[in-house]
Structure formats: C-alpha cells, structure tokens
Image (cartoon, coloured by chain):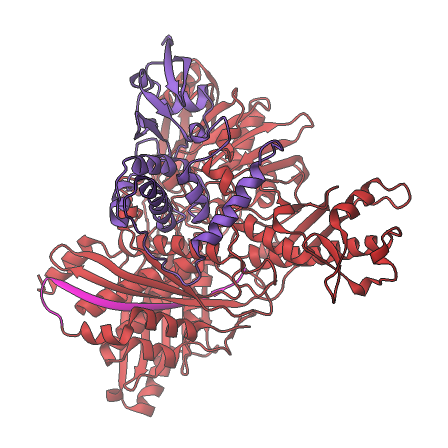
Chain colours: A purple, B red
Amino acid sequence: MSKKIITLHVNGKDQEVAVDERESLYETLRNELRLTSIKKGCEVGECGACSVLLNGKCVDSCIYLTIWAVGKDIVTVEGLKDETNGDITDVQKEFIKQAAVQCGFCTPGFILKAVEIVGANKPYTRDEIKELITGNLCRCTGYMNIVTAIEHAIKHNMDKLGIPYEVQPSTTSFDLPDEEKEKMLKDVLEMQNNDVTKS
Amino acid sequence: MDYIGKSNLRVDAYAKVTGSAKYTADLAPRDCLIAKVLHSTIANGEVISMDVTEARKVPGVVGVFTCFDVPDVEFPTAGHPWSTDEKHQDIADKKLLNKRVRFYGDDIAAVVAVDNVACDKALKLIKVEYKEYPVHTDARSMLNDKDAPILHPNWRKDNVIAHTSFKSSDDFNYDEAKKKAIAEYGEENLIEVVKNVKTPRISHCHIELPISYAYVDTNGKVTVVASTQLPHICRRVVAQALNIPWGKVRVIKPYIGGGFGNKQDMLYEPLNAWLSVKCGGKPVMLEIPREETMVGTRTRHPMDGDVRGLATKDGKLLCRELVNYSTNGGYAAHGHSITAKCAGIFQNLYKNPLGVNSEAYTVWTNAPTSAAMRAYGVPQAVSFAETLTDDICEKGGFDPLKFRMDNLCDENLKAGGVEFYTYGLKKCLEIGSKKIDWEKKREEYKNQTGPIRRGIGMCCFIYQTAVAPIALETASVRMILNQDGSMQLSIGATEIGQGADTVFTQIAAESTGISPDKVFVMSSQDTDITPFDTGAYGSRQTYVTGNAIKECGVILKKKICEYALTMEDEEKLKGKKLEDLDVFDNYVVDIKSKEKLVSLEKLSTTAFYSFTNNQHITAEKTTDIHTNTFASGCTFADIEVDMPLGIINVKDIISVHDSGTLINPALATAQVHGGMSMSLGYGMSEEFILDPKTGKPYNNNLLDYKIPTAMDSPDFKVEFVVMKDPTGGYGNKALGEPPTVAPAVAIRNAVLNATGIGFNEFPLTAQRLVHEFKEKGMI
C-alpha cells in the first residue's frame, strides 16, 4: 500500500511523516520520529505502556491509527522537558523523589497519565487516583509509590491554586521526611546540569 | 557508616522519568530485519513435514527456517552458573527449533523478513503436518499414565526429571512417627490435618516483552543485545546452542523492563543469534508478543502437594510431610532445583521434633516450561506449610500467632550450609502483630454470620540469601579512578529494576570514601567490557556482588593511600605512614583526626600526569562467597469477605522483613511493595490455564490473565527488623524475592478466620469462593 504524507503536531512542533494508513500511532512515533519513550507491552491496549497525550488525554497509541491523530496535539514524555531551561515537570520530580520508578518501562505511560490527572486541577483522593491509573499496568512497584508521587504532584498544583489538600501519611516508619527527599532531588537535577552559565 | 542505610534516590530515576533510558528495542538499528516464530498447534507429537514454499514467496521475506534446518544440538537454557562437573550440569534438552513438539506453542519454525507484516503473512502460509501423541498437562496425570510417551528419552527413561526426599533422618517415616506419637500422647490428644494443596501456573508479566537483536560484528563475533538478567550466562548458552567458541559471542544488556526470573532463562537469544548468522550476519530483531511470551517463555511451577501434619492438643507441632508433584512443562530449564528449594523450605520453616519428610517430583509435561520466578519455589513451599499450620490451629483451637512463636524454626537452624547468622523472625511477628492489632481483631472476628465477614491471618517465611553452597557464587568488580578523583564502577551484575545500581553505588562509596555523586556505575553490561558476574537472581547481588565491591574498594583505597605517600610536595602528608591514612568524602584524611590531607582530585590528576610516578589507579576483585544466611519475615492481613459475591477486600496488610542492614531503606520498601503486589495476584487473581485435553492456553493475554491493577492494590504497610548480619558486605541479607512469598497465604488464612473455610487451591478467585460457600450451604 502506498504511503500518505501527513502532518502531525508532536511535542509542540509540526512534523511531516509518510505513513501507511493502517499504521498505529505507536509505530509512527517510535519508528519514524524515534520517540522511544513510548513502550510496547501488549499491543492490544491493555497495559498502557504506549500511552501518549492526545489533546491532553491519554490514549493507548498501539490501538490508535496515526491518521486519526492529524490535527491533534500529541505529547510524549520527550515533550515534557522544557527545552529552554531543561526543567522537568512536578510529576517527573515526584516520581524520582518517591521511589516510584523501578524498571522504568511503564514509567513514561504513568507519567503522561499523571500529567493528565494533575492537569484536571482536582483534589483527587488516593482511591480516586488508583481508579484513574488503572489502565496502566506496573509489575514492579505495586503502584504504592506511583500513587504517592501523583498525590504529591497534585499537592504542588493545589498549593498553586490555593486549594487545601493533604497527602496521606507514609505507611512505613522507614520513610524520610519530604524535605530530605527534596534536597536529594536538587542534587539529582544538579548532576544533569553541565551548563556552567546556569546556576 | 556514611553512605549505607541512606535512602539515596535512584541513580537511574532521571533517565527513566525523562524517557531517555534506552532499552533493547530503543537501540536496534533502523534497518534491522524482523524475525517471528511459528509455534506448534499441538501439545505432544512430532512435526512430520513442513512446506514453506508459499511462505518463501511473500515479498519482503528474507528467510524461512524450520526445525529441520537447525543445528543438531541440544542446549540447556537455565540461568545457572556452569558446572565443570558433568553430573551437575543443567539438562540440555532443547534445540533452537524442535521437531519433537512437547507443548502447545513449542517453537517449530521462524521467519525473517523486512517487516512485521511480511513475517505474519509468511507464518500463515507455512503448512505443517504432525503426528500426535496423548497430552498430559500436569505432573500427576503424566505420572499416572504408564504408557505416556517419554518426552526426553536421551535424558530419562520416564518423564520424571528428579524425585528426592528431604528427611529429618534417613529412616523417617510419617506413619511410624504418628504411631509413636499415639503411643506417647494418646490418639485423643492429637490433632492431625491431611490435605492436598494446589498452586497456580503464574506468568511473570514483566512489562517489557522478551526482546533481543543480534548481528555478526566486523570482528566475526556473534553479538546479541538482549533484555536478559544475566549477560555472561547468556553468552555461554548462545555459544553452546550455536556450537561455537564461547569467546566468539558478545552479549550486551541495556536497561531492562523487568525480568522476575523469566529473563533468568535464555529464552530466544540463541535462536535470534542463529537467525542473524543465517542471514549473513545482518541485524535481526526478535521480539516475542505478549501472547507468545506467556506460552513460550517460562512460568512459575504449578505444584500439587499432599500435606500432612500432626500436633498435640496443647499446640506442640510434632511432625509433617509434603509429597509434592511439580509440573515442569516441556523442557527442563532449571530442572529439579526449584522444587527442591520448595521442599527444603517446607522442611525447615518449623521445628519437627518427631521428624519431617519433604518429598518432591519434578515432571516433564505437555505444558509451558516452568522455571525461575521471583522466590524460586518458596511461595509454593509456604502455601503448603503455612496453610497446614493454620488448618492445624483451626482444628486445635490454637492462636496461630502463639502456635508459630512456639513451633517456628529458631536461631539454631542450620540446613544445607545455610544458617541464621542473625535471626529476626520472631521479632518480625511481634512488630507485625502489634501493628495490625492481632489479639483484638482475632477476638472481634469470632463467630461471624451474614454476608460480609472480617478475618485476620498471617504467614511466615524463611529465605536463603543467594545460592551458595549449592551453586557457585562469584562476582567481579573493577574500579577505575578518573583524572578528577571520581570513579567508574564496572560490574557484571545487572540492574533489572530492583535498584541494584543505586545500592552498588552506595556500597562503592562506603568502601572507597568516594562520595556517591562521584561514583559512576555502568548501567549497561557488555560481556566484552564489564567483568564476569552470574547476574540477577536468587536475591544474590547485594550480598555477593556487594561483598566483591566492598573488597575491591578496600584495594582501591589502599592504592590511593599508597600513592598519597609518594606525593612529596604535600606538606600535610609528611611523616605519615600507610596506617595513618584513610579516604573520606573525596579526601585522603588522617584516620584518627579526620584532618583532610589531600583531595582525591589533586591526587588523581597528579597520578595520571606525573612524569616521575605515573599511575592509573584501578582495582579489580573477584569474590566467591561460600556462606549463606537466612532472611525471614511475615505478613499479616486483615480482610473482608463478601460471601455472595466471593470477593475478598484487603482492608489492611503489613509485611515485616528480617533482611539485615538495609543498604537503602526507600528502595528496600519499594521492593517489598512490588513483592506484595505480585503475591496478591498469586493469592487472588492470577492463574494461567490450559485446556487439560489439548494443552491449549485459555488466557495468554493481559486481558484474561489478571495481574493486579492499581484499583486491586491496597496501601501496603512495610516494616523491617534491622540486624547487622556478619556475612553480608555491610550486614545485608536477601530482600529481592522474599516479599513475594507470604502475602497470598496470609490472605488465605484470613479467609479461613473469616469464614471457617480453608481454601487449598490458589488463587482464591470469586468463582472458587462462591462454589465452596454454596457447597457448604453458607450462601
């Protein structure tokens, strides 16, 4: 079948690609645009590892045709980093802080889902968060620290909006106070900085 | 200790949250050919003929290879260290593609093409003619059929891989022990439970599929980039399968998206390597789809055990027995070792004053191959032992907590070269029972009726750290001081998600005095670059590799201090001797006063560029470990059973672990969370089912095979008993696998407490509960 030239709006830029009309968005973004943060776990829309944001909502890109995405705003984890200053989102920072990452394979999908959840500007409870992320599977974490990371990211947003919100207390006496994690996060981010003109 | 016991953030977290961490598929060259596998549609028989004429004609197809084309070489697939003793070598019973089909989904042909579409088209056009044999998908049915065809006649005269009995003494016999007990205590003063327990076939469900790509490099080396837990073992097995020298194979392990023991076997790496060789050394990628992964890779062994136990009426456990039939599937993989480990843990979890027999059969069957999965037979061991305990308690009216306190193994346990160098099991029980409010709730939940009932239950375990002395335990480490005093840490041990690289960084920092931010651990293993290590399995790496890193650090530190003594221009070092020096926080310091004498930065730069005393300071160490220490722990679960719906709601669940010193408490906690979740699946929802007549899988996909989602997961509580173990590098014991042992059985025992029904078949699905409640007239 001959390929069709289309324009996709990905991570803030228009990109022209030649696609087979039967191609999934997963295939186009990974194979043509080399956005490798999008992962394959099942290819049938069960695991959520291939999630991308389409107009702010998560979809499983493995069961979504590329041609349907024309005219839509597509965001992948690569697009979350601020290209002007290298900053990452509160969601990503909280995933680092709360040890919500293990093998990391499901992580991009969860992060995009969390960005959608936080972006709803609602003070979701832990149970509500669990329901919202139930389309993403993780085999390493038992979801515990992922939910905690999302709670904390919501908290940052609620603080900005002036809405009262409390994260649930830790369920182990071996946890560190959040300020200490915040300090270590600064070091992690500093490690990434190789620009001496930037403090 | 300065860097041990600190909850450092993961060294790879930034790479993973930004999507920049590269996994195997992300690294494959764009012009990679694609390979796919044709699987058998019968479970037992032979491929008589295969017609690939039409398949070869499909545009884009580069090659079609069948079971008639592969080398006539059978190879072992287990991720065990090789043994130079032939008797201890793994069973070599698998070819790259197999004419003799042993399970539904066996690999019989492969297609290489320019893309997926051409592969799929070609696969559909291959015509296969089979000769079929009768099918037995489980161990007992295989053993009961005396005429069953032998699956591996080269290896055994029947389908039993091994049959062993671990006994308290050679002449122990359960029935004799029972007679003795009757004579001593009187029959009316004894409690006996006799039953059968079945555990499910479980799929690992790492989210990254098994994947590799292979090519022949310019130097003639067969190179495989693979999602494997053990690159060095993978190298050996690929070489064995292709029948080429081991050194001609290079294996590279990038970031890996979970393994849980499945990627402790060589799955499709050997076939992938061979396909590349057959295609002129071009890069060929082989990714196994989820549906094929669940069938064609490995599973947790379904086990079927007859269990007996005898106790006195006042709560003294006397003797126990397990006769266990373990379904190993079509190929031996790890052979008998998993069922044997299961038998050992059943035997040793309790004191058995009148003795114990733990007997095990591992049987080839017409089912997907069973091999390593997180905790290696111990979840099954505890399913036998800890359901037996609670059934005895239920029958005898004993408090399960007190019964365990009285009868559990104690600090004197020594078994097969493993012992408790530190013993925290009963302390774990104290903490767990207090946190869950055991006594109050046991009282509260008595004599319930009605559709919603609450229950509380518990389960204990013991767990070996690493695999010594049964198997070799060895690890190599290389440390390279950079020009600025930072360090490259090169190891063959693998990060597979558990946090190994972070923990290794902390151990290296502790042993060298170089701060963690200046320790650069190599996250990708490459058998041509990183030193030998057998890899990620058996909860071994922090113990074995950790010890090697510690010892390597001592060497590096000594070399640094020795160099410092040669720096004649350094005023502060004048008159110092080697024993006066230490390294701390990137400085050579006075060992007593901690006064900073010279920075490592200055020392390293001097060493690299000195005309008079030029040195590149490196250290290398191979450590083999011969000790092995028991870790232990327990889970307490408080649940609610919805009787008419058969649904179990976990209201509260806590695991307490005795794993020695925690190198990184935050990552240790995260390990426990993941293990608890996996156990919840084993306990309540996961069961990979085959049609017993045809061996055809029913639910080999993530829709019909139910791993826990976030909604299924309660908030997990985690505590630790921290005791410094003298054998661990910094006092640490096993933690990777133990968390997935106890929770399922704690929930099962809580259901017993809630309803009076002791379920003996895992998982406790709604169907099983409702069926049983109806049978008993409870709903």
Q: Quadrant of the N terminus of chain B?
A: bottom right
Does the image show residue B565? Answer: yes
Q: Is residue B555 left or right of residue A149?
A: right
Does the image show residue B253? Answer: no
Q: Residue at x 46, y 52 (%)?
A: A179
Does A14 sit above or below residue B455? Answer: above
Rendering coords of residue B670 (x, y %): 43, 53
State the extent of the magenta-drawn residues as a range.
B448-466
Rendering coords of residue A160 (x, y %): 34, 40
Q: Is residue B754 magenta-colored?
A: no
Looking at the rendered structure, the number of numbered marks drawn on it comes to 0
Q: Residue at x 46, y 55 (%)?
A: B666
Q: Residue at x 13, y 54 (%)?
A: B645
Chief secondary structure of the magenta span?
A: strand
Near-viewer residue (B100 or B370): B370
Does B368 sit above or below residue A76? Answer: below
